[in-house]
Each structure stands twice: as C-alpha cells, then as structure tokens.
Image (tube, rainbow, N blue to C red):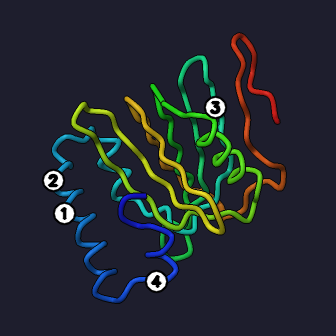
C-alpha cells in the first residue's frame, strides 16, 4: 500500500500524520480520476472495509483474476462486489497472499487504493486483516455490484486456479 499502510491502520501515526495520508490519497485520486475507466472510478468510490472474500478464481494462462467480496452496503444491508481483472500481472508472492486471504475465512479488507502508472497500467491495492496485503496490476476491470442477503460466505476455503481447457478446481 502506498498510502494506507498497516502502520496507518494500527494507529502508529499521529492524528496529523493520519490526516496527511488520507489527504494525499484523496489528492492522488482527484489527479488520476480523469484517466480511470468508469469501472475503476466506481471501484474507487466503493468501501470494501470489513469485506470478506467469497471466492477467488485465478486463470493464469488468460491473465484473468476474479474476486467476489461480501461487503457492507450501509444501513445493515449487504452487497456482492465482483471484480474481474483482465491482463492481471501477479507473481507467486501475490498469488500466495490472495490464496491465504481466501483460505482464512476470518480475513477482512482493511483498506484499498486504486492507482494508474504513467504507462496506463492500473493497480488495485488491498490491505487485509490480520495479515497480508496485495497489489493487483491489470489492464482492464469489470465490476458488478448486486444485493446480498447478508455477510456470510461459505465455510470452505475459496481459492481456485483454473487450468487451460478445465473448469476451476478447488485447491
């Protein structure tokens, strides 16, 4: 995470430093918003704080990553936030962090950031509780948001890696 680090979340910063971090991210977001496609603009406005991973499907041969979150929508209503990253660039460490987050059904999202670099490559950064963070670099994002009955996700760990010509298999 560039802005919302674990130290920021755990209160290691003074109130003034914390405000500066939040203001710096808001400034960066205002700067890049005109460069963001609609789905990424919408994602930047959605709070995933306390969201839980419902499932992840990683299709390495297609460079496609799909994550579905159970997230609070407000006023005790919930929503499913589905993200499909096309052209996802993920190394082994990032895949392992995602696998760990999906396997531990207690893991929640603490903070997220969106960004774009000078070459037009997009990034979505996720800080998880109680551990791990991951940056997902990608070319295109598809976003769906639908109502959900509640925050519950299945008890089964939900990380799948799709193989060429196969349906995703549970790990």
Q: Count residues near mark 3 (Cα–Cα under 10 Å), then give few for <14, some for 14-19, many for 20+.
A: many
Q: Position of residue 47 (x, y in %)?
A: 44, 64
Which mark, by number, is residue 58?
3
**SS at circle 1:** helix
Count of all numbered marks drawn on residues in the image: 4
131 vs 125, left or right, is: right
Task: Report, in whole angstroms, how far the alpha carbon at label 2 lies from the one at label 1.
Answer: 6 Å
Residue 96 x %, y %: 68, 43
- Nearer the observer: mark 1 or 4; the answer is 4
Q: Earlier along the polypeptide chain: callout 3 or callout 1?
A: 1
- Dot 4: element: loop
Per the model, the C-alpha gap separating discs 1 and 4 is 22 Å
Observer-nearest of 13 and 103: 13
* Real-space Cα separation, disc 2 to disc 3, in angstroms: 31 Å
Question: Which is more N-terminal, label 3 or label 2?
Answer: 2
Classed neighbour count for the residue bearing mark 1: other residues with Cα under 10 Å, few (<14), some (14–19), many (≥20):
few
Lower sequence index among marks 1 and 4: 4
- Identify the residue shown where x is 40% and y is 83%: 13
The answer to whether the residues at label 3 and label 4 have Cβ atoms under 8 Å apart is no
Q: Badges 2 and 3: C-beta atoms under 8 Å apart?
A: no
Give the residue at mark 2. 31
Who comes first in sequence, dot 3 or dot 4?
4
Q: Which residue is mark 1?
A: 27
Q: Position of residue 60 (x, y in %)?
A: 61, 23
Secondary structure under the numbered disc 3 in the rendered image: strand
First along the sequence among labels 4 and 2: 4
């Amino acid at each position: 995470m560039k802005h919302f680090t674990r130290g920021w979340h755990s209160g290691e910063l003074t109130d003034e430093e914390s405000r500066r971090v939040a203001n710096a991210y808001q400034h960066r977001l205002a700067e890049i918003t005109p460069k963001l496609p609609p789905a990424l603009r919408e994602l930047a406005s959605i709070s995933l704080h306390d969201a839980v991973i419902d499932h992840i499907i990683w299709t390495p041969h297609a460079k496609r990553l799909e994550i579905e979150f159970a997230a609070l929508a407000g006023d005790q209503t919930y929503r499913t936030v589905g993200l499909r990253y096309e052209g996802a660039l993920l190394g082994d460490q990032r895949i392992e962090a995602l696998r760990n987050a999906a396997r531990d059904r207690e893991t929640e999202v603490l903070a997220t950031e969106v960004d774009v670099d000078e070459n037009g490559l997009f990034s979505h950064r996720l800080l998880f509780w109680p551990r791990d963070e991951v940056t997902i670099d990608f070319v295109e994002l598809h976003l769906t948001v639908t109502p959900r009955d509640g925050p519950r996700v299945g008890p089964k760990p939900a990380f799948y890696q799709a193989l060429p010509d196969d349906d995703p298999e549970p790990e």
